[in-house]
């Protein structure tokens, strides 16, 4: 594995959020490392911090959220959903998530944020009558990309006025984390303190 970010174990808030969703089921350290494209040292540090917060249990089958962890994840989920793979765009893995009760936003700024965070591209859509539509002109995603629109609707229970963030990148880990990055730009202030404390 390439030694990416110097000798110090380092991870971002996006990694911490992704791990909480991943740990709904028992997962080993190596799998987390592969899913997030993170060094094992960083994963170890992150798991140790989660252990310090008493939100995970470790078993033979791997690490997973305990009852306190599940409650923490539910509080996170009130702001935005888990990022899920929804196929490919431009030959790259694409991930989507839903942001609940979004504040005011400018699509172009959010797309720029995703690209700054290693995405190759991003779409920011608003849900209207159960359909993801482009906020600029109200055009449904289904008109231009019917297959993607179906996958998004199958992956999430869409509520009107929610935002759908779709990001794609060369690597799945970058696509996933750039989607979380956009969600954190929008909802970071409302994150539970325990999650913010992981990267201090």
Image: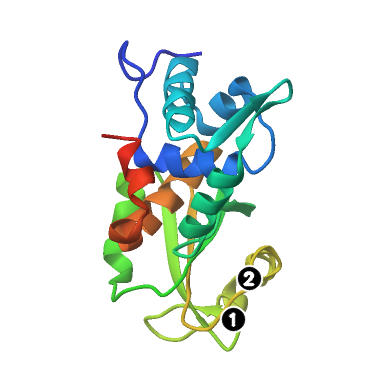
Mark closer to the observer (2, 1): 1
Residue 48 in percent (x, y) is at 45, 23
* Callout 2 crowding tier (Cα within 10 Å): few <14, some 14–19, many ≥20: some
Label 2 or label 1, whichever comes before in sequence order: 1
Most extreme residue toward the bottom is 129
Total labels drawn: 2
Q: Nearer the viewer, residue 149 or 194?
A: 194
Q: Nearer the viewer, residue 89 or 177?
A: 177
> Residue at (30%, 14%) from the top-left corner?
6
Q: Nearer the viewer, residue 152 or 134?
A: 152
Secondary structure category for the residue under label 1? strand
The vertical placement of 54 against 182, above or below, is: above
Q: Is residue 23 left or right of residue 49?
A: right
Kindly tell me whether residue 91 is visible in this rendering: no
Q: Are marks 2 and 1 in contact (CB under 8 Å)?
A: yes
The vertical placement of 104 against 56, above or below, is: below
The circle drawn on residue 14 is: none
Residue 140 in percent (x, y) is at 55, 81
> Residue at (44%, 15%) from the top-left corner?
41
Residue 142 occupies which quadrant of the picture? bottom right
> Residue at (61%, 30%) from the top-left corner?
57
Q: How is the image coloured?
A: rainbow
Kindly tell me whether residue 149 is visible in this rendering: yes
The residue that label 2 is drawn on is: 149
Distance Cα–Cα, label 2 vs label 1: 8 Å
Secondary structure category for the residue under label 2? helix
> Residue at (61%, 70%) from the top-left corner?
145
* Callout 1 crowding tier (Cα within 10 Å): few <14, some 14–19, many ≥20: many
The residue that label 1 is drawn on is: 131
Residue 105 in percent (x, y) is at 29, 72
**Location of the C terminus (image quadrant):** top left
Residue 24 in percent (x, y) is at 64, 44
């Amino acid at each position: 594995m390439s030694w990416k970010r110097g000798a110090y174990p380092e991870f971002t808030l996006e990694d911490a959020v992704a791990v909480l969703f991943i740990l709904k089921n028992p997962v080993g350290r190596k799998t987390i490392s592969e899913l997030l494209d993170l060094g094992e040292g960083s994963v170890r540090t992150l798991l140790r911090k989660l252990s310090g917060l008493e939100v995970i249990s470790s078993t033979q089958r791997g690490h997973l959220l305990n009852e306190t962890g599940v409650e923490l994840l539910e509080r996170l989920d009130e702001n935005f959903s888990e990022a899920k793979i929804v196929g490919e765009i431009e030959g790259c893995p694409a991930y989507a998530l839903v942001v609940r009760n979004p504040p005011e936003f400018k699509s172009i700024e959010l797309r720029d944020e995703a690209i700054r965070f290693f995405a190759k591209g991003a779409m920011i859509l608003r849900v209207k009558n159960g359909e993801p539509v482009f906020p600029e002109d109200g055009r449904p995603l289904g008109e231009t990309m019917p297959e993607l629109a179906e996958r998004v609707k199958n992956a999430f229970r869409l509520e009107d006025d929610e935002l759908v963030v779709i990001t794609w990148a060369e690597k799945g880990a970058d696509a996933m984390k750039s989607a979380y990055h956009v969600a954190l730009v929008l909802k970071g202030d409302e994150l539970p303190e325990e999650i913010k404390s992981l990267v201090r």
